[in-house]
């Protein structure tokens, strides 16, 4: 086992002190043993119990040092979700180029190259900005919070599914049963059911899906935000009201 240099120095001091001591041999021996013991304790503390600076301890506990070591260079094939997981503050850069909540808090699984092509962003400039953010992230913690423009499409999609499984499907089944029971295709009394079924399927199923997709995607394709989200949400209630009035 290699002896630390500090221990050797303390040992030599103890020996010289013992040789110069004018006390008796017994007292000198006891003093030498105490000095040697203190020297060993001091050497052990120096070698095995080196103090950790407070700022270094905070970095270790917060995982900042580990995070910096784990950070990789972002390439065009890196996914958006992986970038946001590695550097959450990079969301502000994506929002500037049209992300605005796509994929939720974790971001979409699409690659950076695909994102740049869809949103017509400069890929090389995006790579420079993101890698600069990874190397020197902002101290500000950005917490993702959904707003109405981020989830408005879900309301349209869910309402469309409810309509096609209830009103649209019900009127279609009634019309088919009447045709099969009477074995006659042209029945004037079935026209209201057929019209209501077609109205619910076209405007309630297809129409609401198209509107939900447009409200979600078009602003992001144009690198902007949805104008008056509450008015856009109002169109959902107007569409549903029109479908119910047509059925009445």
Image (cartoon, helix red, strand yellow):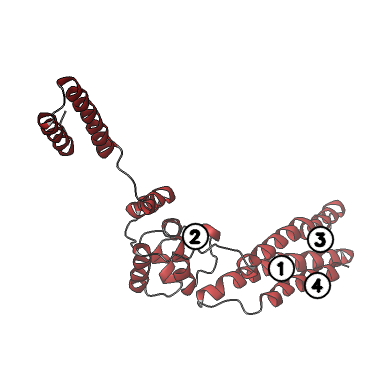
Image quadrant containing the C terminus = bottom right
Q: Of tags 4 and 3, which is closer to the observer?
A: 4
User: Between marks 1 and 4, how big is the CA–CA gap?
Assistant: 12 Å
In the foreground, 136 or 226:
136
Q: Which mark is residue 190?
A: none
Label 4, secondary structure: give it.
helix
User: Between marks 2 and 3, how big is the CA–CA gap?
Assistant: 49 Å
The tag earlier along the polypeptide, 1 or 4, is 1
Q: Are marks 2 and 4 in contact (CB under 8 Å)?
A: no
Label 2, secondary structure: give it.
loop
User: Few, some or many C-alpha atoms within 10 Å of disc 2 (few <14, some 14-19, many ≥20)?
Assistant: some
Residue at (66%, 75%) from the top-left corner?
229
User: Between marks 3 and 1, how big is the CA–CA gap?
Assistant: 22 Å
Label 1, secondary structure: give it.
helix
Q: In the shown orientation, is residue 28 left or right of residue 69?
A: left
Q: Are marks 1 and 4 in contact (CB under 8 Å)?
A: no
The tag earlier along the polypeptide, 2 or 4, is 2
Image quadrant containing the N terminus = top left
In the foreground, 148 or 9:
9
Q: In the shown orientation, is residue 88 left or right of residue 101?
A: left
User: Few, some or many C-alpha atoms within 10 Å of disc 4 (few <14, some 14-19, many ≥20)?
Assistant: some
Label 3, secondary structure: give it.
loop
Q: In the shown orientation, is residue 230 left or right of residue 30?
A: right
- Across and down, in percent, residue 72 comes to 33, 56
Q: Of tags 2 and 4, which is closer to the observer?
A: 2
Q: Are marks 1 and 2 in contact (CB under 8 Å)?
A: no
User: Few, some or many C-alpha atoms within 10 Å of disc 3 (few <14, some 14-19, many ≥20)?
Assistant: few
Q: In the shown orientation, is residue 36 left or right of residue 97?
A: left
Q: Which residue is mark 1?
A: 202
């Amino acid at each position: 086992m290699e002896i630390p240099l500090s221990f050797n120095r303390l040992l030599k001091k103890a020996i010289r002190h013992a040789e110069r001591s004018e006390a008796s041999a017994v007292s000198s021996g006891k003093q030498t043993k105490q000095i040697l013991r203190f020297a060993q304790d001091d050497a052990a503390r120096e070698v095995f119990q080196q103090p950790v600076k407070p700022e270094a301890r905070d970095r270790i506990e917060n995982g900042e040092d580990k995070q910096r070591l784990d950070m990789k260079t972002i390439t065009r094939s890196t996914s958006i979700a992986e970038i946001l997981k590695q550097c959450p503050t990079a969301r502000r850069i994506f929002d500037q180029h049209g992300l605005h909540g796509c994929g939720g808090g974790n971001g979409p699984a699409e690659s950076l190259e695909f994102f740049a092509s869809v949103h017509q962003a400069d890929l090389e400039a995006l790579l420079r900005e993101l890698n600069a953010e990874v190397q020197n992230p902002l101290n500000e913690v950005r917490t993702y919070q959904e707003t109405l423009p981020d989830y408005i499409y879900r309301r349209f999609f869910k309402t469309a599914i409810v309509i096609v499984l209830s009103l649209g499907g019900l009127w279609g089944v009634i019309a088919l049963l009447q045709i099969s029971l009477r074995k006659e295709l042209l029945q004037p009394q079935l026209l209201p059911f057929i019209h209501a079924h077609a109205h619910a399927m076209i405007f309630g199923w297809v129409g609401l899906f198209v509107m939900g997709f447009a409200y979600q995607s078009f602003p992001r394709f144009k690198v902007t935000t949805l104008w008056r989200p509450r008015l856009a949400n109002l169109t959902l209630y107007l569409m549903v009201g029109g479908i119910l009035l047509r059925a009445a």
